[in-house]
Image: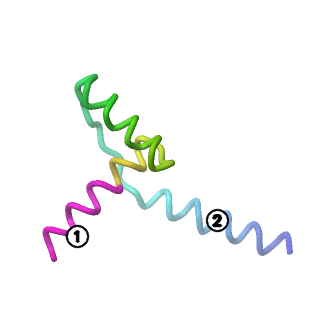
């Protein structure tokens, strides 16, 4: 059981390491709008930005 938990933790850590990090500069007003939107959708601001970018890419390919 413990080995299974450790394996799942390793998979999650490896997945997180595969994400690229970027520096993003936003105006305070845009930050506030994204923060409010993220809260409405029960996401972090980073999660909201990632979701929005993924949706835009999906629609562009569509």
Q: Locate residue 52 relative to residue 46 in the image: left or right.
A: left
Q: Secondary structure at mark 1?
A: helix
Residue 62 versus residue 10: which sits nearer the camera?
Answer: 62
Residue 58's label in the rendered image is 1
Q: Position of residue 28 (x, y in %)?
A: 28, 22
Q: Position of residue 21 (x, y in %)?
A: 35, 47
Where on the picture, by quarter, is residue 11?
A: bottom right
Q: Secondary structure at mark 2?
A: helix
Image quadrant in which the C terminus is located = bottom left
User: Are there few (<14), some (14-19), or many (20+) residues within 10 Å of tag 2?
Assistant: few
Residue 21 versus residue 45: which sits nearer the camera?
Answer: 45
- Residue at image coords 34%, 28%: 32
Q: Locate residue 27 relative to residue 7 in the image: left or right.
A: left
Q: Earlier in the sequence, mark 2 or mark 1?
A: 2
Circle 2 is placed at which residue position?
A: 10
Instruction: Tell whether label 1 touches label 2 (CB within 8 Å).
Output: no
Determine whether 7 is above or below 53 in the image. below
Most frequent secondary structure within the magenta stretch:
helix
- Residue at image coords 29%, 62%: 54
Image quadrant in which the N terminus is located = bottom right
Where on the picture, by quarter, is residue 40?
A: top left
Whole-number angstrom distance, CA of label 2 to CA of label 1: 29 Å
- Residue at image coords 81%, 73%: 3
- Residue at image coords 58%, 59%: 13
Q: Locate residue 35 relative to residue 10 in the image: left or right.
A: left
The span picked out in magenta is: 51-62
């Amino acid at each position: 059981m413990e080995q299974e938990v450790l394996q799942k933790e390793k998979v999650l850590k490896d997945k997180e390491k595969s994400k690229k990090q970027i520096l993003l500069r936003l105006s305070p007003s845009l930050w506030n709008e994204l923060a409010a939107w993220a809260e409405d959708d029960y996401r972090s601001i980073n999660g909201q930005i990632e979701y929005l970018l993924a949706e835009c890419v999906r629609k562009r390919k569509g």
